Amino acid sequence: MSFYTPVVPPQRNPAKLETRRSLLKKLGLGALGVGAVGAMQSRAVAAFAKSAATNDTDLAVLNFALNLEYLEAEYYSYAVDGRGIETYGIGVTGSGTAGTTTVKSAPAVNFVNAGVRQYAVEIAADERAHVAFLRAAITGAGDTPAARPAINLRESFAAAALAAGLGAGFDPFANETNFLLGAFIFEDVGVTAYKGGAPLLTNKTYLEAAAGILAAEAYHAATIRTILYQAGATAQQAAQAISDLRDSVDGADDLDQGLVVNTSANIVPTDANGIAFSRTPRQVLNIVYLAVNASGGGFFPNGLNGALR
């Protein structure tokens, strides 16, 4: 089921496109680039172990974020490669009730635009890295990371689209168009969740790491919002319907913003001060459970694992 035909800017000659990794290799920096990333992650994880005494609230927030990262990492990984995060060597065990991911058979998206596929591949790698980092950081702080809970990437999307008024039978893996709309659901929620969780963190090391992940999620969200905005009125209307659905379940406040405000592009949803808005854990749960004050459902049929669930 597709809601619009993507309109994408002209693509460069594929022969001239280079990935960051190939460019590093040509410059003789390939090994250094990969090693530097690994070293940076190791130092960051070590900082957690050396930081102040473990705070239950801080760890609850990190595990809450980990649950959301499982969801995003699974979505993008299945979309680009048709397989779950554990096949990449990412851990999924831990505290709480472990679950599997429900997804259609052969979920990999048939991308028609090389640029969009590259964006999806990059975001997928980022989301898996977030899962690995948070799991290692929580372990380094002396706690057990939350296990991946049961995740539904099939019926949940169909239910969300139906509730948004977009029709029945929505499949985010059916085509590139639907994939982008599915990504739109997650990315904005991730940004607002990290910002909302920031005031709850007391440990500056944790706060710095959360700020870094928030920045990455904001880049992702802006990329998805830009592509959808460029696709035209039908895509913008579908995104607005999703935005309205999020607003209807996340609380009484009118926080969410679509891709267009007063006939102008709205790539970055902010307040009058140009500041991204926040969501509380409860507001985030309402969206991912697709119900107000529920303890599970939607994308997490049995709820999240951890204290904030």
Image (cartoon, rainbow, N blue to C red):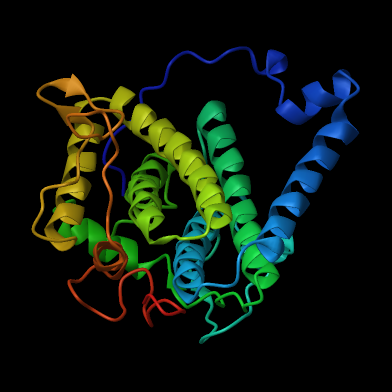
Please state, as top left, top right, bottom left or bottom right, where the C terminus lies in the image. Answer: bottom left
Task: In the rendered view, tell whether residue 42 sits above or below residue 14.
Answer: below
Residue 194 is left or right of residue 42, and the answer is: left
**Displayed quadrant of residue 159:** bottom left
**Displayed quadrant of residue 120:** top right
Task: In the rendered view, tell whether residue 8 sits above or below residue 64.
Answer: above
Pick the front one: 144 or 285: 144
The answer to whether any part of residue 90 appears in the image is no
State the image coordinates of residue 213 (x, y, percent, origin top left).
Answer: 52, 47
**Displayed quadrant of residue 289:** bottom left
Residue 263 is left or right of residue 286, and the answer is: left
State the image coordinates of residue 65 (x, y, percent, origin top left).
Answer: 47, 62
State the image coordinates of residue 78 (x, y, percent, origin top left).
Answer: 56, 57
- Count of marks placed on residues: 0
Residue farthest to the front, as pictured: 52
Q: Residue at x 34, y 33 (%)?
A: 225
Task: In the rendered view, tell whether residue 41 sits above or below residue 71.
Answer: above
Q: Residue at x 47, y 13 (%)?
A: 10
Residue 241 is left or right of residue 82, and the answer is: left
The answer to whether any part of residue 44 appears in the image is yes
Q: Residue at x 87, y 33 (%)?
A: 32
Pick the front one: 156 or 113: 156
Pick the front one: 155 or 190: 190
State the image coordinates of residue 36 (x, y, percent, origin top left).
Answer: 81, 38
